[in-house]
Amino acid sequence: MTDQKPESAYHYAVIRRALDILDAAGAEPMPLDDLAREMHMSPAHFQRVFSRWVGVSPKRYQQYLTLGHAKEMLRNRFTMLETAAELGLSGSGRLHDLFLRWEAMSPGDYARHGAGLEIFWGWFESPFGPALVMGTAKGICGIAFAAETGAEAAMEDLLSRWPKATFTEDPMALRPWVLNAFGMEKTLEPTPLYLIGAPFQIKVWEALLSIPSGQVTTYSEIAQAVGNPRAVRAVGTAVGRNPVSWLIPCHRALRKSGELGGYHWGLPVKRALLAYEAARADASA
């Protein structure tokens, strides 16, 4: 079922267990020794695994998992999407850090529900647990994280999006794109994305692509960016229907209150994605 380095799945499993323990602890910070003991690991080993995965200590990482940090991100790392677009940060121009380029299916092709389209699929280990990746000859069109939902539900979800397409299991056809996209192996050629969605969804996903790594925005700001400020609820639906998790960063969309909101593949995954990016951004600053 998997391709990539097995320690990545192990690292995510460690983080996932830590999230459960920290959630149960509430707002009280948990010392390293106590957290390591709860996870049946020595403090030194847990610290090494944790720091390798995210680039900062468990104590620092805990700060990225709180509601207060989400609110701080909105205050200090809020991305004005119109400004980002003016600076050339939209679409393929902003994605230098992920080495991506993208194009969208035409509305007419989308209306045919994938008829005549061949989609390859395969399972890979990602930094966030098992990932189901799908793609056409033009690029990756779907990424589902199965750590919370399970493999069967993830597969059913992506298959249902393009019911008339032909699906072929071929992880090797996708492997170079996947390893590049998850930062495991950098290639000279950018990883292509092929966005399959309704016109309004494509506009919302394009706005999401304008949010730099380590920053966040709100659903209302996205609605402003796509030219329909009253369509906050429709924007939320389009964000939730994003088929290409991580690469189209729907996890960077928060509520105005600073609450994380929902996430299609499970809220713990969203928290891990945001914390991973925030910690990496601070570590490289």
Image (cartoon, rainbow, N blue to C red):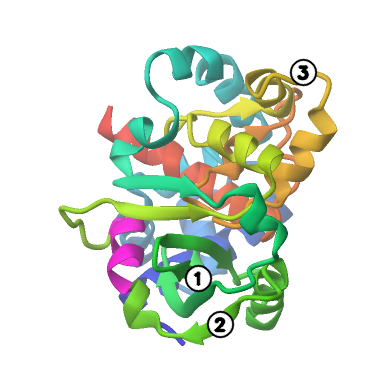
The residue where tag 2 is placed is: 167
Calculate the distance from the C-alpha at mark 2 to the C-alpha at mark 1.
9 Å
Calculate the distance from the C-alpha at mark 3 to the C-alpha at mark 1.
32 Å
Taking 258 as reference, is 54 above or below it? below
Residue kind at label 1, given as amino acid type: Met
For the residue labelled by badge 1, is the local secondary structure a helix, a strand or a loop? strand
Q: Is residue 273 visible?
A: yes
Q: Residue at left 81%, top 27%?
A: 231
Q: Where is residue 2 in the image (x, y as percent from the top left)?
A: 42, 83
Q: Which mark is residue 229?
A: 3
For the residue labelled by badge 3, is the local secondary structure a helix, a strand or a loop? loop
Q: Residue 134 carries which label?
A: 1
Seen from the viewer's position, the closer of residues 110 and 13 is 110
Q: Quadrant of residue 9?
A: bottom left
Name, please, the residue furthest toward the left. 188
- Label 2 with label 3: CB-CB less than 8 Å: no
**Residue 14 forms part of the magenta stretch:** no
Q: Position of residue 136 (x, y in %)?
A: 45, 68
Q: Nearer the viewer, mark 2 or mark 1?
A: 2
The quadrant the C terminus occupies is top left
Q: Residue at left 29%, top 37%?
A: 96
